[in-house]
Image: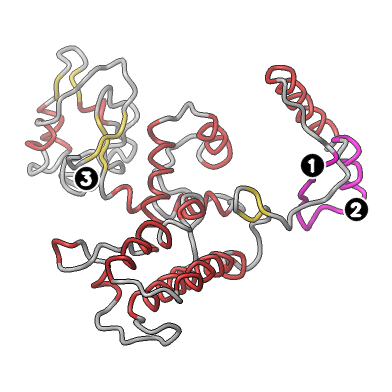
Amino acid sequence: EPRECEEVMKVVRKYGKASGQCINFEKSSLLFGKRINANTRQEIKDAMGIQNEGGMGTYLGIPEDISGSKCKLFAFLKDKLMHRVNGWTGRWLSKGGKEVLIKSILLALPTYVMSTFLLPLEICENLASAIARFWWSSNPPKRGIHWAKWEKVCLPREEGGIGFRMIHEFNLALLAKQLWRLVQFPDSLVARVLKGRYYKLTSPLRVNSASCPSYVWTSISAARKLLLLGIRQKIHSGYEVKVWEDPWIPTIPARPAVPVAPVMHPNMRVSDLIDQIGKDWDVGLLENYVNPEDIPLIRSLAISSSHRRDTFCRSYTR
């Protein structure tokens, strides 16, 4: 609505004064959703002082409008990759030369897009297929014989492979890195924006359904399972950690505690199991509520500080 537009323009003007960088409204454009009618669009254009409508171009190599078929949207990645490959096919390259080109250029091409969006499996397979064809072909443009499965070629060298990246798995790893940043830096601007929209009263690692989530949030959420395989809650005060839901028991992967009987207190926090006077585990409470096999694991955990927020740490070494 116009009032919200005016608030946005106040921020823009304040940024311009602080940085000395002024926005050129003639070169700027607005992107509207399909449900916005023509009258509302014109009101917003007049309030913002921007008359152009956009959405068809790209920004930093990523399409402005992330909607519709994702396979069609990200098809440009294969086109870019094939453009590079076609420029090399006339050269007589050794296997070593091809390996360097694949690792340093072809597999790096979609990295920026993959750090923000989850690519459809069809796109990942198309990219892997194009790279595999380039790898095995000795007389371009003939296909060549594929002497081993691509999954085997992608294994680390110590396991008999060449060390090429599996594209879908690498995509999830990059998205898990973004999710890890949201966990580690909850006061950053992006974390506060996403928290206000998707997980106001909980954590980005807790499974929660959002109404009409953006594709960015859907992509980041897809890496949740992967990230939880490698991290666990680190106990400081214990006030923010749920005993029966959060991964805080130091197994690999980390998991919630197992109750000794059907859960009596589903919202019990780890702080409830700590003797607040002695700042140590309350053995009596542990024996009453927690499975005996978990008690030694819990007692091996050091309680850092009752004044610090509970954080996450890696379960593995560097």
Question: How many numbered markers are drawn?
Answer: 3
Location of residue 104 (image quadrant) = bottom left
Give the magenta range.
Answer: 26-48
* Residue 96 in the figure: left or right of residue 26: left
The numbered dot on residue 28 is: 1
Q: Amino acid under label 2?
A: Ala
Location of residue 3 (image quadrant) = top right
Q: Amino acid under label 1?
A: Ser
Label 2 and label 3: CA atoms lie apart by 53 Å
| First reached walking from the N terminus: tag 3 or tag 1 | 1
Q: Amino acid under label 3?
A: Ala
- Badge 3: how crowded within 10 Å, few (<14), some, or many (20+)? some
- Within the magenta stretch, is there residue 59? no
The numbered dot on residue 223 is: none
Query: Which residue shows up at 79% across the image and 46% down it?
Result: 30
Label 3 and label 1: CA atoms lie apart by 48 Å
Query: Which residue shows up at 57% across the image and 54% down it?
Result: 215
Secondary structure type for disc 2: helix
Q: Is residue 95 above or below residue 211?
A: below
The numbered dot on residue 38 is: 2
Q: Which residue is identified by label 3? A: 254
Of marks 2 and 3, the one in the foreground: 2
Query: Which residue shows up at 34% across the image and 74% down it?
Result: 135
Label 1 and label 2: CA atoms lie apart by 19 Å
Of marks 1 and 2, the one in the foreground: 1
Q: Is residue 273 above or below residue 275?
A: below
